[in-house]
Image (spheres, grey):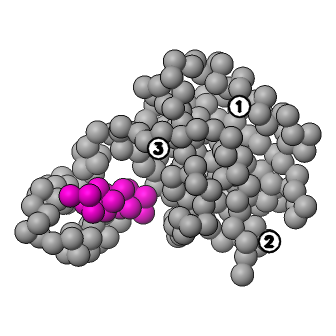
Amino acid sequence: MKVLLVISFLLLSTIGWAEEELFCFFIPPEKWEAVDPSKLNRYVRVGFAGKGSGNFRPTINLAIENIGDSSLKSYLKAVKEIHESDKNTLWRDLGKFETAAGCAELTEITTKTQLGELRLLQLILLHDKKAYLMTGGMPTEEFALHRAPILKAFRSLTLTSNLFSTFPNLEKREKLEKAFANLKEVGLNTFQQMVLEEGKEMGLHWQIVVLQEAEKK
């Protein structure tokens, strides 16, 4: 059984995390599976893994950091210093990158491990005193294979105060909104099935977030 790529998760462990006020989700690459939360670093909110040909599976994850009034320039400087303190790690700023949530910064991290060299793409989006970080990781030799789907997932990063407002199909949106508003009458199991069937186009992460909110009601 292939080992999960955990390096990208561990690189975030020096940061203190906070709950976000907005809902945040992205559309993971097609056919990638949600990673068992028990296998994730405790600072990572959600992770997905694809199929790889070596010892590591390609992964993508999301984490959120409370940064106060820190500017993008100072935040990137701090991130660079963290990574460059490791002699086996190379960090590069690749510039601006547009997402559904706004303009972000794209960076690249190359790190050497005992099992081989890993390449990480990390998206950094600052919004309302928080940093939203998406990290996609893979063996360097598989970079060309996984780069495009990971960047596509980065572009889908969305921040919203209403999970249903981003739904492109108005009929399905109204159906799900009505069911969510009347969850006690509909029943959690029935609503879960509706989300899994009607919400496929929104991606697995959106479905997970919606069902998490339903469980709180």
The amino acid sitting under disc 1 is Val
Q: Relative to 128, does residue 197 appear above or below in the rendering?
A: below
Residue 140 percent coordinates (x, y): 81, 55
> In this orientation, does residue 152 appear?
no
Q: Determine which residue is flagged by label 2.
A: 54
Residue 81 percent coordinates (x, y): 78, 28
Which of pointers 1 and 3 indicates the residue nearer the eye?
1
Residues rendered magenta in the picture:
204-217
Residue at x-position 74% and y-position 40%? 108
What secondary structure do most residues of the magenta stretch adopt? Answer: helix
Name the quadrant of the C terminus. Answer: bottom left
Q: Earlier in the sequence, mark 1 or mark 3?
A: 1
The amino acid sitting under disc 2 is Gly
Based on the picture, tell me whether residue 33 belongs to the magenta stretch. no
Q: Determine which residue is flagged by label 1.
A: 79
Residue 175 percent coordinates (x, y): 14, 61
Based on the picture, tell me whether residue 207 belongs to the magenta stretch. yes
Q: Determine which residue is flagged by label 3.
A: 157
Residue 195 percent coordinates (x, y): 27, 66
SS under mark 2: loop
